[in-house]
Amino acid sequence: MQIDPIYLDATLSSTDIQHVMQERTSGRQQQAGTAPAHVWLRLSDGIEYAYAGKLQFAEVTALAGKDSVTVRAVFPNPEGLLLPGMSVRPQIREGVRSQALRVPR
């Protein structure tokens, strides 16, 4: 079984996708460059995974009756830390707000 690289399939709500599209249409948010979006993982113990992944694709249509869209990201996994079926929380940077403030926790 190949686990380096490893793939992550995640679902996003159609509502979240619509919100991002409305933000871009209104000009409040710009696309974060032409390269594929970066994806970060938070492991089940709360630790951030050391390697960023790249968004490989997103479905063009929402899943019927599910109100969600599937996205796939690919991550380097040289130490074999990520295993199929593990519980992780992905974070995707899809856009940039130039007038936003970043406040530390």
Image (spheres, helix red, strand yellow):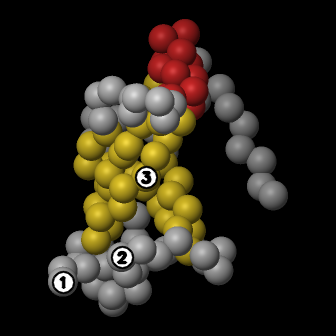
Q: Position of residue 46 (x, y in %)?
A: 65, 74
Identify residue for label 2: 84
Residue at the far right in the pictured view:
105
Amino acid at dot 2: Pro
Identify residue for label 1: 1
The first of marks 2 and 1 along the sequence is 1
The first of marks 3 and 2 along the sequence is 3
Category of crowding for the residue at label 2, using alpha-carbon neighbours closer than 10 angstroms: few (below 14), some (14–19), many (at least 20): few
Q: Is residue 32 visible?
A: no
Q: Are marks 2 and 1 in contact (CB under 8 Å)?
A: yes
| Cα gap from disc 2 to disc 1, whole angstroms | 10 Å
Category of crowding for the residue at label 1, using alpha-carbon neighbours closer than 10 angstroms: few (below 14), some (14–19), many (at least 20): few
Please give the label number shown on residue 51: none
Seen at 77% across and 48% down, the residue is 103
Q: Left or right of 92: which side holds 104?
A: right
Secondary structure under tag 2 reads: loop
The first of marks 1 and 3 along the sequence is 1
Q: Position of residue 12 (x, y in %)?
A: 49, 41
Residue at the far top in the pictured view:
26
Amino acid at dot 3: Ala
Seen at 36% across and 61% down, the residue is 8
Identify residue for label 3: 10
- For the C terminus, the image quarter is bottom right
Q: Position of residue 27 (x, y in %)?
A: 53, 13
Q: In terms of image quadrants, where is residue 23?
A: top right
